[in-house]
Image (cartoon, helix red, strand yellow):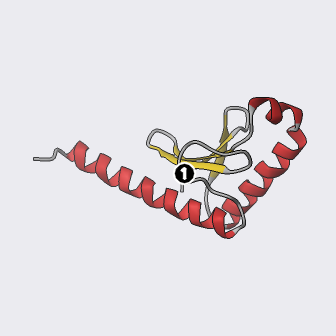
Amino acid sequence: MDTPTDVATSVATGAGQDLERVVRQELTEAGFSVEPSLLTADGGLGVWHDPARGVVVTWGRSAEQLVRYSTIRDAVQLALRTVLVEAGHQVTEDFDGLELIVTS
């Protein structure tokens, strides 16, 4: 028999997966290449649900390119944030802006 904690965790996980699906769809419709898994190809987006933080969105570039092309990274992050906020989501940054966290 499920405990109240098990049920709450199950509901939170389901809601997080629903939010991940919505975020993936919105970013795809905005023209971004959203990868089907956590691993991102160059230029694609990684999108996944982290139960402790929310839905994580990352832009798939190598560490060297992220530093070398910081202006481009900033523009991509701004575009991602704009699409998500205009869709009504709450968005924060993590890891010095390398990850966007969508919580609703």
Q: Residue at x 64, y 65 (%)?
A: 28
Query: In this orientation, which residue lies closer to the viewer: 91 or 30?
Result: 30
Query: In this orientation, which residue lies closer to the viewer: 66 or 36?
Result: 36
**Circle 1 sits in a helix, a strand or a loop, which is it?**
loop
Q: Residue at x 44, y 53 (%)?
A: 16
Q: Residue at x 73, y 38 (%)?
A: 97
On screen, 72 above or below 22? above
Residue pointed to by mark 1: 103
Task: Find residue 14 and report its horizontal and vertical position in percent.
Answer: 36, 56
Q: Quadrant of the C terminus?
A: bottom right
On screen, 64 above or below 70? above
Task: Find residue 45 and report its horizontal and vertical position in percent.
Answer: 66, 50
**Relative to residue 43, is residue 68 drawn left or right?**
right
**Relative to residue 58, is residue 43 drawn left or right?**
right
Q: Residue furthest bottom?
A: 29
The number of callouts visible is 1
Task: Find residue 38 and report its horizontal and vertical position in percent.
Answer: 54, 44
> Residue 11 appears in which quarter of the rendering?
bottom left
Query: In this orientation, which residue lies closer to the viewer: 56 or 36?
Result: 36
The 10 Å Cα crowd at callout 1, few under 14, some 14 to 19, many 20 or more, is some
Q: Residue furthest front?
A: 41
Q: Residue at x 51, y 41 (%)?
A: 53
